[in-house]
Image: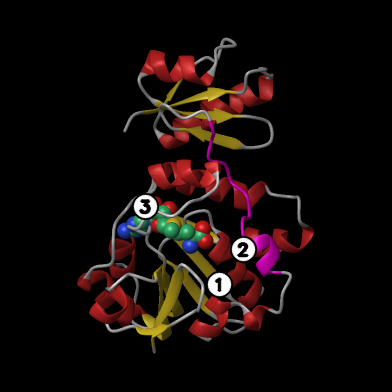
Amino acid sequence: MKTVVTTAYRLTPETSADARQIASELGLIFVERRKKSIGKIQAETGADVVAVTKERLEFYLRGKTEPFFFHPSSAAFRTRRPLEEDPLVSVSGLAPGDAFLDCTLGMGSDAIVASARVGAAGRVTGCEANPIIAYIVQRGLRIYTELAHLIEPMRRIQVVQADATTYLASLPDESVDVVYMDPMFTEPIAGAANFEVFRDAAAVDQLSALWVREARRVARKSIVLKAHFRSEDFEKYGFERRVRPNTKFHYGVIR
Ligand SMILES: C[S@@+](CC[C@H](N)C(=O)[O-])C[C@H]1O[C@@H](n2cnc3c(N)ncnc32)[C@H](O)[C@@H]1O
């Protein structure tokens, strides 16, 4: 899918330089905004648009007026509760000092919770297949300043833009404590406008035997799968399913 980079509607010298730099880092074409609407740029270029504003990167898919941008999402409230009670932490057994690999970084909320849990002595890597999502989230994790308690956990996350199975294959045996995967649900679920754009842009790969085999080789402690409650992947790949009454998704674990 073609994507171009432009600036905010109101141009400043900084955002212009920033936008050109980001276009070059992503290997994308930079387009002057010239006070055009995003819709006009989408129509003229036939492309999705990344708009660089002073505060954030906004990703507008063709035909959409709502952008995807980085925000901590559920990590904002999950990190205010006792972390050992967070379902991802308790299912995985993730402990302070652990190394955590999130194979499907997405918006980064699970990785932020994991980073808060493992602390400064631990390590969190987030792998994301979509290069634009990976870039926007990596930058958000680096520059976010709103909720003070999230800043350090965010800064510690290493983002890798890669396919998860390929990335896992590059890692040594038993080199991380917990490997986590949260592929896109195939069942449609309602979400906020920001999530809908994310859903349309995200890679929709589902688990494969190779992905799980590589995860088993790399994980020391556990492999955790989050999937829709109707997903048959838990049983298909040998995860012990943790049923969560009245929730749309379940966790599964291989120890
Ligand atoms: C449901 S989202 C993950 C949400 C994430 N757990 C969070 O807390 O925000 C799934 C993400 O995985 C990415 N993805 C899908 N297949 C992938 C693959 N094979 N390798 C790496 N990332 C993948 C998608 O692009 C999407 O961003």
Discs 2, 1 touching: Cβ within 8 Å: yes
Q: Which residue is mark 3?
A: 129
Residue at coordinates 54% horizontally, 43% vertically from top-left? 194
* SS label for mark 2: helix
Instruction: Using residue 11 as the reference point, say whether residue 40 is left or right of it.
Output: left
Ligand 1 has an atom within 8 Å of the beta carbon of the residue at disc 3: yes
Q: Amino acid at mark 3?
A: Ala
Extreme left residue here?
A: 209
Q: Judge whether residue 162 can be spotted in this image.
A: no
| Label 3 neighbour load within 10 Å: few <14, some 14-19, many 20+ | many
Ligand 1 has an atom within 8 Å of the beta carbon of the residue at disc 1: no
Q: Quadrant of residue 53?
A: top right
Q: Which residue is mark 2?
A: 156
Q: CA distance from mark 2 to mark 1?
A: 7 Å
Instruction: Using residue 170 as the reference point, say whether residue 209 is left or right of it.
Output: left
Magenta part of the protein: which range? 66-79
Front-lying residue, 196 or 224: 196
Q: Amino acid at mark 2?
A: Arg
Q: Which residue is mark 1?
A: 123
Residue at coordinates 59% horizontally, 76% vertically from top-left? 122
Residue at coordinates 39% horizontally, 71% vertically from top-left? 229
